[in-house]
Amino acid sequence: MTRSELIHQIFAKQSFLCVGLDPVMEKIPAHLLEFEDPIFEFNKRIIDATSEYAVAYKPNTAFYEALGVKGWESLEKTIKYIPDECFIIADAKRGDIGNTSTAYAKTFFEKLPCDAVTVAPYMGKDSVQPFLKFDGKWAIVLGLTSNEGANDFQYYANKEEQPLYAKVISTVMEWGTSENLMFVVGATRTEQLADIRRIAPEHFLLVPGVGAQGGSLEDVFNAGATTDCGLLVNASRSIIYAGSGTDFEVAVKKEALNIQSEMALYLQRLMR
């Protein structure tokens, strides 16, 4: 999916919501365990309940890989079930030497119809560039994450007092463009989000941490929005586990609608 196609979907749906598809067998509604593939059935119903409000979906591959071959089959079916107009992110956090990264890129861009892959930049340019060689595909590079461990390395400053996350983002920007590069920035880091937006004024940012992790959607928008939005805000647990009964989709749909309705109010500011 190209940048212009993504922006079109954002304004058509009045939403920049990304739904994280991170199923845990022990947490999905019990009645779904009767199905041959409970994980896919769960995801299918989540997608059906939210596709009116979401512009993107982000399955975290770890939750599928932990189930072995069957989990990978559930992932493949899930990705192929997502509507064509939605942006699909494989949250795989890959990052290795060039030939290995090329194999990862082929996995998610050729074998699976994903639009983007999350990438760890620690190994440098040759670990990121292979993901940037596919037309209409994106690398979403870890910039500043919302987990506690982010403090271990990501704020480390060089002699110019530039934190590592800022160095990573400014350097990675030279490897691609705003048409094929995004950055992950945690929603709980809104003060730094404004700084990152100054460093990368045009690139889309994928922002997890709204919802169960306590990030503020309004703060994220105020700090990170561009004239064409420039944001994908991810919510996972707060949506997919909004309900637990046989009619869990009702609560899921309601939660997605609540987030989309708030997003629509913010997007209206850009259209004035």
Image: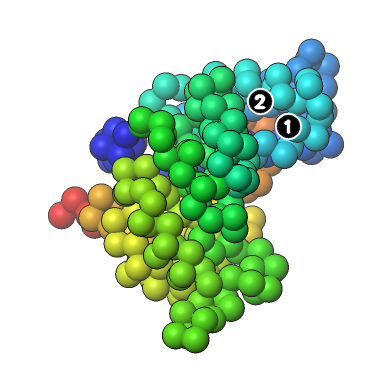
The residue at the point 50 percent across, 27 percent down is: 109
| Nearer to the camera, 152 or 243 | 152
Does residue 125 appear in the picture of this structure? yes
Q: Is residue 67 above or below residue 197?
A: above
The residue at the point 37 percent across, 42 percent down is: 180
Q: Position of residue 49 (x, y in %)?
A: 54, 28
Residue 1, labelled with which disc?
A: none
Which residue position is annotated with label 2?
Answer: 75
Q: Secondary structure at mark 1?
A: helix
The residue at the point 32 percent across, 69 percent down is: 198
The quadrant of the image that shows the C terminus is: bottom left
Separation of residues labelled 2 and 1 (CA atoms): 6 Å
Dot 2 crowding, Cα within 10 Å, few <14, some 14–19, many 20+: many
Q: Are marks 2 and 1 in contact (CB under 8 Å)?
A: yes
Q: Secondary structure at mark 2?
A: helix
Does residue 58 appear in the picture of this structure? no
Q: Position of residue 96 (x, y in %)?
A: 62, 46
Outermost residue on the top side: it is 36
Q: Position of residue 92 (x, y in %)?
A: 62, 41
Q: Is residue 183 above or below residue 80?
A: below
Q: Is residue 24 above or below residue 163?
A: above
Dot 1 crowding, Cα within 10 Å, few <14, some 14–19, many 20+: many
Q: Is residue 2 left or right of residue 248?
A: left
Q: Position of residue 255 (x, y in %)?
A: 55, 43
Of label 2 and label 1, which has the lower sequence position?
A: 1
Which residue position is annotated with label 1?
Answer: 64
Q: Is residue 270 above or below residue 114?
A: below
| Nearer to the camera, 199 or 237 | 199
Amino acid carrying label 2: it is Leu
The residue at the point 71 percent across, 24 percent down is: 72
What's the colour scheme? Answer: rainbow
